[in-house]
Image (spheres, grey):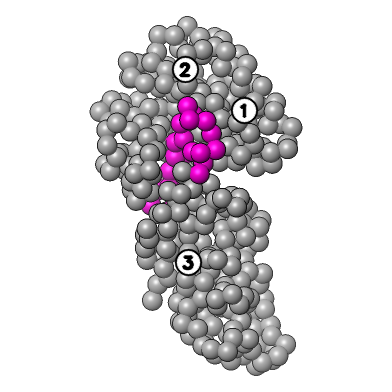
């Protein structure tokens, strides 16, 4: 018996349409579907988003681009965030992929390999992760002039908190840098950036996690539902423990259920002894350490024997789980279900 992950394609489409509506008509809304669309399936999601009007897609690597290329019409644009690698010169050319050039080194290599094709430039506006420094932009200005620049990109580091004053600092830094690219399209905002305000939208927005329900907003719909099958139930006597290290010991008689799903499936060990599974609306506390393939919960208070319990659903979203595990919804989502059976619902 394996768990099922249901992925609601229709809600992903609605989320994209909502995000698209938040910005001006002249601002394009792309879709970031790196890491197999945050683990949910890049093929299915790229096709669904193409249907509602997304024409540009961002992935991290060339392999991911080759993967989604198969199901998208040739008029799509695919950007590769990690940049250019001359080893893949042929694929870049043949599939017309657009590398995000992040450094002088990548630029040199791009000019050597594909100089007549489109490229995107990323400017580092304070995250110190990828991109040209402002000084380097001036230095390579002439080189850029002879190239087919499709897009100039910046990335925000504090957008999750719209009030953080660093957002404005980054916005100003971006504005200063793009003076050098008067005719090229610009993009600054990922999911959280879209919600700061429309000063951050520019010509193209790049939502990822918001498409998949990973931000708290009344208009963003949940996308994922996960149910785990019950493998076994039994009673514990007072003083008996559960799981590795017996980190939970019961004080009174309890009925417990063990379900097929563990940290290999994205139920991170951080949920041990603090997380919940749900029987309809009734929370069932996780008891003891979560194992690789199994989790044990308290079902003493249920008046019927469940055949399955819900891990992600109406009563517990990926945002709730990210709070419990003290991480972000991106990481919760990406860890789900390599061995779950997948169901796409429309
Ligand atoms: C991952 C990524 C995005 C999408 O971010 P979300 O927070 O998932 O919306 C956008 N731009 C860049 C450069 C990224 O690396």
Q: Is residue 23 magenta?
A: yes
Percent coordinates x, y for residue 327 in the rendering: 63, 53
Q: Can see residue 103?
A: yes
Q: CA distance from mark 2 to mark 1?
A: 17 Å
Residue indicated by mark 1: 199
Q: Quadrant of residue 108?
A: top left
Name the residue rendered at 46%, 43% in the picture: 17
Is the shortest distance between ligand 1 and the CB of mark 3 under 8 Å? no
CA separation, marks 2 and 3? Answer: 43 Å
Q: Earlier in the sequence, mark 2 or mark 1?
A: 2
> Which element type, helix, strand or loop, lies under badge 2?
loop
Residue at image mark 2 = 184
The local secondary structure at tag 3 comes to strand
Q: Which residues are magenta?
A: 18-41
Residue occupied by mark 3: 226
Query: Where's the N terminus, which quadrant?
Result: bottom left
Q: CA distance from mark 3 to mark 1?
A: 37 Å
């Amino acid at each position: 018996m394996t768990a099922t992950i249901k992925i609601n394609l229709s809600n992903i489409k609605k989320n994209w349409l909502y995000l698209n509506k938040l910005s001006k008509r002249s601002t394009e809304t792309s879709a970031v579907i790196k890491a197999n669309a945050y683990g949910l399936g890049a093929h299915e999601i790229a096709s669904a988003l193409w249907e509602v009007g997304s024409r540009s897609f961002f992935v991290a690597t060339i392999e991911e681009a080759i993967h989604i290329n198969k199901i998208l019409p040739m008029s799509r644009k695919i950007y590769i965030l990690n940049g250019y690698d001359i080893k893949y010169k042929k694929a870049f050319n043949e599939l017309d992929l657009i590398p995000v050039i992040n450094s002088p080194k990548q630029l040199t290599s791009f000019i050597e390999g594909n100089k007549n094709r489109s490229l995107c430039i990323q400017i580092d506006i304070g995250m110190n992760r990828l991109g040209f420094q402002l000084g380097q932009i001036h230095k390579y200005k002439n080189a850029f002039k002879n190239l087919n620049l499709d897009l100039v990109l910046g990335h925000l580091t504090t957008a999750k908190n719209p009030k953080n004053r660093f957002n404005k600092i980054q916005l100003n830094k971006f504005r200063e840098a793009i003076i050098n690219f008067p005719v090229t399209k610009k993009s600054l905002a990922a999911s959280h950036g879209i919600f700061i305000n429309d000063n951050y939208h520019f010509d193209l927005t790049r939502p990822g996690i918001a498409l998949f329900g990973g931000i708290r907003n009344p208009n963003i719909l949940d996308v994922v539902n996960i149910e785990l099958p019950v493998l076994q139930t039994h009673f514990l006597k007072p003083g008996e423990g559960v799981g590795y290290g017996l980190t939970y010991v019961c004080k009174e008689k309890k009925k417990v259920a063990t379900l097929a799903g563990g940290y290999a499936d994205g139920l991170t060990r951080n949920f041990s002894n603090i997380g919940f599974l749900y029987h309809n609306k009734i929370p069932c506390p996780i008891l003891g350490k979560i194992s690789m393939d199994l989790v044990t919960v308290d079902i003493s208070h249920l008046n019927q024997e469940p055949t399955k319990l819900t891990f992600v659903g109406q009563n517990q979203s990926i945002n709730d789980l990210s709070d419990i595990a003290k991480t972000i919804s991106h990481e919760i989502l990406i860890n789900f279900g390599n061995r779950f059976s997948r169901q796409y619902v429309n």
